[in-house]
Image (cartoon, helix red, strand yellow):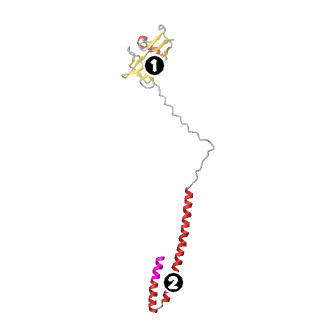
């Protein structure tokens, strides 16, 4: 705006100069220059006032943004206390017990024949194991198992059991007083400790 004003002023001055030279009127030229100077002064004053207004607005905006950025810390009060969450550890999985049915033992106290199901007329003992390597065994308390065991007490019972009491009469039950223990060795279940039984 100011550059346009000055360029207009100089172009008018050149025209006026030609008039002055043409007319030879120095007073007329001087009065034109005074008018131009007054107009310029007014323009400068107006621009200065506008700049002051802009500066004031800018400073107000800066103050507002500073006040907004400084936020007083707020405290939150809870009516009810917060209890920490109690997380209980999951219970360890109980190992599953597997039952195996054993036929007549060998003379060395091992069981050469093992089945996952009771075989009538063949199975005499039941073995319980959790790890598949160690277990406890007892005589199956059934008529079929007793009949099979009584075929030969010395061959079917004594290699893996200690028999208490009389064996003279045919028993109705063979009671396991203390279970025997066995472990798996080379693919065979072998007696570690004999079971203790008696006849009734």
In the displayed structure, would residue 54 be above or below residue 39? above
Q: Secondary structure at mark 2?
A: helix
User: Looking at this view, is 168 or 22 the one in front?
Assistant: 22
User: Looking at this view, is 173 or 24 the one in front?
Assistant: 24
Residue 128 highlighted magenta (yes or no): no
Which quadrant of the view contains residue 18?
Answer: bottom left
- In the picture, measured across the screen, residue 77 lies left or right of residue 102, that is right
Which quadrant of the view contains residue 126?
Answer: top left
Residue 2 highlighted magenta (yes or no): yes
User: Looking at this view, is 199 or 78 the one in front?
Assistant: 78
In the displayed structure, would residue 191 be above or below residue 65? above
Give the image location of residue 156, x and y in percent. 42, 14
Closer to the chain start, of discs 2 and 1, is 2
In the displayed structure, would residue 84 be above or below residue 51? above
| Residue at the (50%, 89%) spot, across then down | 27
| Residue at the (53%, 73%) spot, across then down | 48
The residue under label 1 is 137
From which residue to which does the magenta span run? 1-10
| Residue at the (54%, 67%) spot, across then down | 55
**For residue 94, which numbered disc appears in the image?**
none
Q: Assess disc 1: are there few (<14), some (14-19) or many (≥20) residues with their C-alpha within 10 Å of its C-alpha.
A: many
| Residue at the (48%, 79%) spot, across then down | 5
In the displayed structure, would residue 88 be above or below residue 154? below
Task: Considering the whole magenta stretch, tell me its main secondary structure.
Answer: helix
User: Looking at this view, is 108 or 119 the one in front?
Assistant: 108
Q: Assess disc 2: are there few (<14), some (14-19) or many (≥20) residues with their C-alpha within 10 Å of its C-alpha.
A: few
Residues marked 2 and 1 touching at CB (< 8 Å): no
Give the image location of residue 111, x and y in percent. 40, 18
Q: How many marks?
A: 2
**For residue 34, which numbered disc appears in the image?**
2
Give the image location of residue 169, x and y in percent. 49, 8
Q: Secondary structure at mark 1?
A: strand
């Amino acid at each position: 705006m100011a550059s346009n004003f000055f360029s207009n002023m100089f172009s008018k001055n050149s025209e006026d100069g030609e008039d002055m030279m043409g007319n030879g009127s120095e007073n007329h030229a001087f009065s034109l220059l005074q008018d131009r100077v007054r107009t310029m002064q007014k323009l400068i004053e107006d621009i200065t006032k506008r700049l002051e207004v802009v500066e004031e607005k800018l400073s107000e905006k800066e103050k507002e943004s500073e006040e907004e950025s400084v936020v007083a810390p707020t405290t939150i009060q809870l009516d009810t206390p917060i209890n920490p969450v109690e997380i209980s550890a999951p219970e360890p999985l109980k190992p599953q017990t597997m039952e195996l049915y054993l036929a007549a033992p060998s003379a060395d106290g091992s069981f050469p024949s093992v089945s996952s199901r009771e075989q009538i007329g063949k199975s005499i003992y039941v073995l319980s194991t959790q790890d598949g390597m160690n277990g406890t065994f007892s005589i199956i308390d059934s008529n079929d198992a007793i009949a099979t065991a009584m075929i030969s007490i010395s061959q079917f019972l004594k290699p893996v059991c200690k028999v208490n009491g009389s064996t003279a009469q045919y028993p109705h039950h063979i009671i396991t007083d203390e279970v025997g223990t066995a472990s798996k060795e080379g693919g065979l279940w072998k007696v570690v400790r004999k079971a203790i039984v008696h006849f009734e």
